[in-house]
Image (cartoon, grey):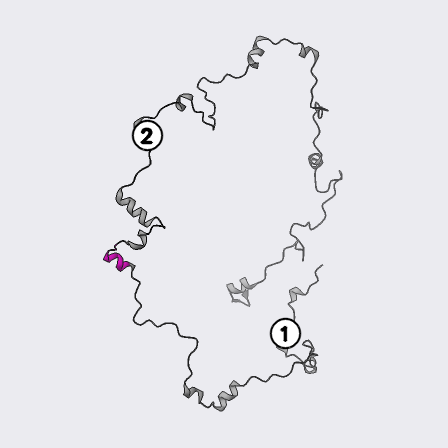
Amino acid sequence: MAVSGVCTTIPRISILAEPKPVPSGFIRDRRSVYWLSKRPVTREDGCEGHGKRFPLLAASKKWHPDYMGDRPTPVSPVSRAAKNAIANGRIQILSLPRVVPKDYQPLRSSYTVVSPAAKNAKASRRLKELAKCHQPSSETSIVSTIWWNPTSKERETEKPELSEHLQALAAPKPTHLEYKPNRSVFWPVAPTALQVTASPRIDEISRPKNRPTIDDNYDPYKISQGALHAKPVPRLAELATPNAHKMHHKG
């Protein structure tokens, strides 16, 4: 940019600081960007903004010419000829039920049926031995009788012998040498603290704050006369002025 024969360059920051130009079709305070800026053009066929295809698409779908509607009853009448008809060999074959495969096995019943042979069978000597309850050894029976029977008197007299390592593990953890128990909530006051004389400053701080009596007729919203006649400084009036872009009327 040249002015009076002197070449000057506009700074980049000045170009970026310029406001964005307003578009030509800009409408101020438009409620939605989807609203039309103007009414659509009315055509000769009466459709506003649409062609001849739009009424065809909006029309309801027509029924098929061969459509007979719903049947009046679910019972279909059978003609006399159909009742007296004789089926041929092919129809008789198709009407037969499906043959079950030879390897088909039906579901097993939840109730087991014991055969008469199993009811009258006699158990062998080996089967009788396996059917007996397990007999524990003598040592196991003594221990189980003493320690698992709460009514046993031998449990109170006989006790098992523990090893030294097990006794060491069972011993409680010792208290630390520097451990101090919790301080009692009650502690004696020293005689010097009972006979001490408070200084004037401590006496002044310890007194309760003197508050004026509360007026029941006090109005917190009442404005004083001094505030009504006060005049703001120019800077305060400038800050109280609303922004210019927010003062237009919302139509």
Looking at this view, name the residue that lies furthest to the left: 164
Q: Which residues are magenta?
A: 161-169
> Which residue in the structure is indicated by mark 1?
238
In the rendering, at what x and y percent does residue 42 appear?
74, 43
Question: Which label belongs to residue 128?
Answer: 2
**Element type at marker 2?**
helix
In the rendering, at what x and y percent does residue 224 appear?
69, 81
Looking at the picture, tell me which residue is in the foreground, 14 or 90: 90
Looking at the picture, tell me which residue is in the foreground, 188 or 250: 188
Could you say which quadrant of the image residue 178 lies in? bottom left
Image quarter (top left, top right, bottom left or bottom right) of the N terminus: bottom right
Q: Earlier in the sequence, mark 2 or mark 1?
A: 2
Residue lying at 32% horizontally and 47% vertically, measured from the top left: 145
Residue lying at 32% horizontally and 28% vertically, measured from the top left: 127
Residue 164 covered by magenta stretch: yes
Q: Of helix, strand and loop, which mostly describes the magenta segment?
A: helix
Number of the front mark, 2 or 1:
2
Looking at the picture, tell me which residue is in the foreground, 61 or 89: 89
Residue 206 covered by magenta stretch: no
C-alpha separation, residue under disc 2 versus residue under disc 1: 112 Å
Q: Is residue 177 left or right of residue 241?
A: left
Picture layout, residue 247 above or below residue 160: below
Image quarter (top left, top right, bottom left or bottom right) of the C terminus: bottom right
**Element type at marker 1?**
helix
In the rendering, at what x and y percent does residue 34 appear?
65, 49
Q: Is residue 93 visible?
A: yes
Could you say which quadrant of the image residue 117 lies in? top left
Residue type marked 2: Lys
